[in-house]
Amino acid sequence: MLKKEFIRDGNRRIIGSVTTEYSDTSAVVRDQGNRIAGRTSDRFHTTRDSSGKLVSINSTDPGLLIRKK
């Protein structure tokens, strides 16, 4: 079952979301406009942005894809 968590800024506005529990242990990160901002992979321990470029190795932190305001 997919699990969706919302990411909020200091004013409780939604600035993104993370959907986890995929069968390949990845997560999809979406921005405020519900566009895919990137993907994470627990299997390969990587984080990629929406264009597929590598953002981080050895860290599957979805927070790397959500810009802080």
Image: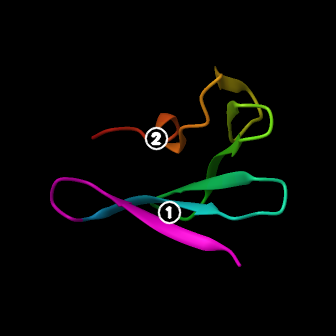
Q: CA distance from mark 1 to mark 2?
A: 16 Å
Residue at x-position 55% and y-position 70%: 4
Q: Residues within 10 Å of mark 2 (few under 14, many from 20)?
A: some
Q: Outermost residue toward the top?
A: 57
Q: Is residue 30 magenta?
A: no
Q: For the residue carrying disc 1, how many other residues have a C-alpha within 10 Å: few (<14), some (14-19), or many (20+)? A: few
The residue that appears at 46% across and 41% down in the rendered structure is 63
The circle drawn on residue 33 is 1
Q: Is 30 drawn above or below residue 67 in the view shown? A: below
The segment highlighted magenta reads 1-12
Badge 1 element = loop
Q: Residue 15: x, y in percent? A: 37, 57
- In the figure, residue 28 lies in which quadrant? bottom right
Residue that sits furthest to the left in the current view = 11
Q: Position of residue 61 (x, y in %)?
A: 54, 38
Name the residue that disc number 2 marks. 63
Name which residue type carries label 1: Gly
Magenta span includes 7: yes
At label 2, which amino acid type do we have? Gly
Q: Is residue 10 left or right of residue 5?
A: left
The colour scheme of the drawn protein is rainbow
